Image (spheres, grey):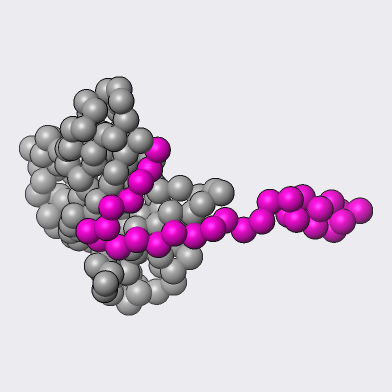
């Protein structure tokens, strides 16, 4: 009975269609247009220095790094709206992570959220933490580059992903 029910449910929900974009591509999400404009990998030492002013005794032990994704977002709706990039996940190699809220403590005034008027464009940045324990080996973790990942902005019925590398043509 269990196998029959499992098959019946899955047959009603087919796999999502997938749309793949790259850095610089315009991606539509709800009433917004999103363009990933840059990435940065911040190591533990840099994170500790950036946090020094906020947390007196804050020191990462070298087991963490952040992948920062910068996006330009345009409101194509007819009303003012809030945009929140922290809702998007970062994925690669079967690994997935949500946004790193600690990133907001050491960033400049550009965070993952923006309030936009119709037609207005703003830059947002969202950080994703990466810890050595999330990878099969330390070597895998030490070799990561932002271009190995993609940002998933929707899952179903259409899975929209933005690869953190430019696409040819």
Which sits in the foreground, 60 or 73? Answer: 73
* Residue at 16% from the left image edge and 51% from the top image edge: 47
Relative to 99, residue 76 above or below:
above
Which sits in the foreground, 148 or 52? Answer: 148
Which sits in the foreground, 86 or 140? Answer: 86
Image check: 91 left or right of 13?
Answer: left
Relative to 12, residue 102 above or below:
above
User: Residue 113, image x and y in percent?
Assistant: 26, 34
Q: Is residue 91 visible?
A: no
Which image quarter: residue 40? bottom left
* Residue at 32% from the left image edge and 39% from the top image edge: 32
Is 24 covered by the magenta stretch? yes
User: Residue 58, image x and y in percent?
Assistant: 18, 43
* Residue at 40% from the left image edge and 62% from the top image edge: 20
Image check: 9 left or right of 26?
Answer: right
Q: Quadrant of the C terminus?
A: bottom left
User: Residue 14, image x and y in percent?
Assistant: 66, 56
* Residue at 80% from the left image edge and 57% from the top image edge: 7
Residue sticking out furthest to the front: 78
Relative to 43, residue 88 above or below:
above
Residue sticking out furthest to the bottom: 139
Which image quarter: residue 99? top left
Image check: 45 left or right of 3?
Answer: left
Is 104 covered by the magenta stretch? no
Which sits in the foreground, 114 or 103? Answer: 114
Q: Which residues are magenta?
A: 1-30
């Amino acid at each position: 009975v269990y196998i029959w029910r499992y098959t019946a449910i899955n047959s009603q929900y087919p796999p999502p269609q997938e749309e793949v974009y790259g850095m610089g591509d315009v991606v539509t999400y709800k009433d917004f247009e999103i363009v990933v404009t840059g990435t940065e990998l911040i190591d533990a030492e840099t994170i500790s220095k950036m946090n020094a002013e906020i947390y007196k005794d804050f020191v990462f032990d070298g087991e963490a790094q952040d992948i920062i994704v910068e996006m330009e977002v345009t409101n194509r709706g007819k009303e003012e709206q809030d945009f929140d990039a922290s809702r998007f996940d970062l994925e690669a190699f079967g690994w997935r992570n949500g946004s790193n809220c600690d990133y907001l403590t050491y960033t400049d005034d550009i965070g993952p959220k923006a309030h936009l008027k119709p037609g207005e464009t703003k830059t947002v940045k969202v950080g994703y933490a990466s810890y050595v324990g999330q990878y099969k080996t330390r070597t895998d973790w030490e070799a990561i580059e932002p271009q190995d990942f993609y940002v998933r902005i929707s899952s179903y019925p259409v899975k929209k992903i933005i690869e953190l590398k430019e696409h040819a043509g």
